[in-house]
Image (spheres, rainbow, N blue to C red):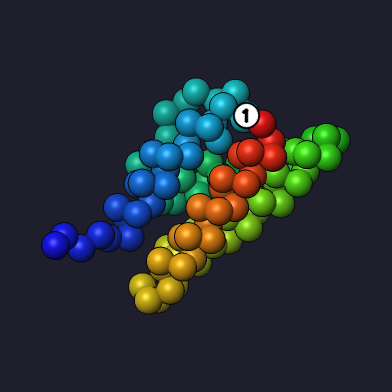
Amino acid sequence: MAVQTKNDTFAALRDCFATDLAALIADQAPRGNTPNAFIDLVEEVRDVLASSSIGAWQDASEELDRAAGYLTDALTGPDGDQRSLLAWARTHLRDGIATAS
């Protein structure tokens, strides 16, 4: 059985959510394939949505802020916590995108 690495997990999240996140800010620019590049995208979208006067977008920004925090913690924290942190990040990414759409 293959062992899934931290980078593999971030790549899976990026593959699942990056296109939808970029679409929220009308960004088609290619992003890097690193975990940090994905976190940067989440934070950029969070900041754009937070600056809006639309309540749903501000709510989405809060979800993305939580997701960014969990992603950062998963990247920098102990490997034992990674699985649960990434699960929480995935939940907040999904909720943030749904709320903003």
Q: Is residue 86 left or right of residue 58?
A: left
The answer to whether 96 is drawn above or below residue 87 in the figure is above
Element under label 1? loop
Q: Which one is nearer the viewer's eye here, 45 or 17?
A: 17
The answer to whether 72 is drawn above or below residue 79 in the figure is above
Residue at (58% x, 61% y) in the render: 69
Total residue callouts: 1
Would residue 47 be visible to someone looking at this image?
no
Q: Is residue 26 left or right of residue 71?
A: right
Q: Quadrant of the C terminus?
A: top right
Residue at (70% x, 44% y) in the render: 60
Q: How crowded is the residue under tag 1: few (<14 C-alpha within 10 Å), some, or many (20+)?
A: some
Residue at (44% x, 51% y) in the render: 36
Q: Quadrant of the N terminus?
A: bottom left
Q: Percent position (x, y) of residue 16?
A: 43, 40
Q: Percent position (x, y) of residue 89?
A: 53, 56
Q: Percent position (x, y) of residue 90?
A: 51, 52
Q: Is residue 65 left or right of residue 1?
A: right
Q: Residue furthest left?
A: 1
Q: Percent position (x, y) of residue 32?
A: 38, 39
Residue at (62% x, 30% y) in the render: 24
| Amino acid found under the numbered disc labelled 1 | Ile
Q: Which one is nearer the viewer's eye here, 92 or 74?
A: 92
Would residue 63 be visible to someone looking at this image?
yes
Q: Is residue 10 left or right of residue 57?
A: left
Q: Which residue carries the number 1 mark?
A: 25
The quarter of the picture where residue 2 lies is bottom left
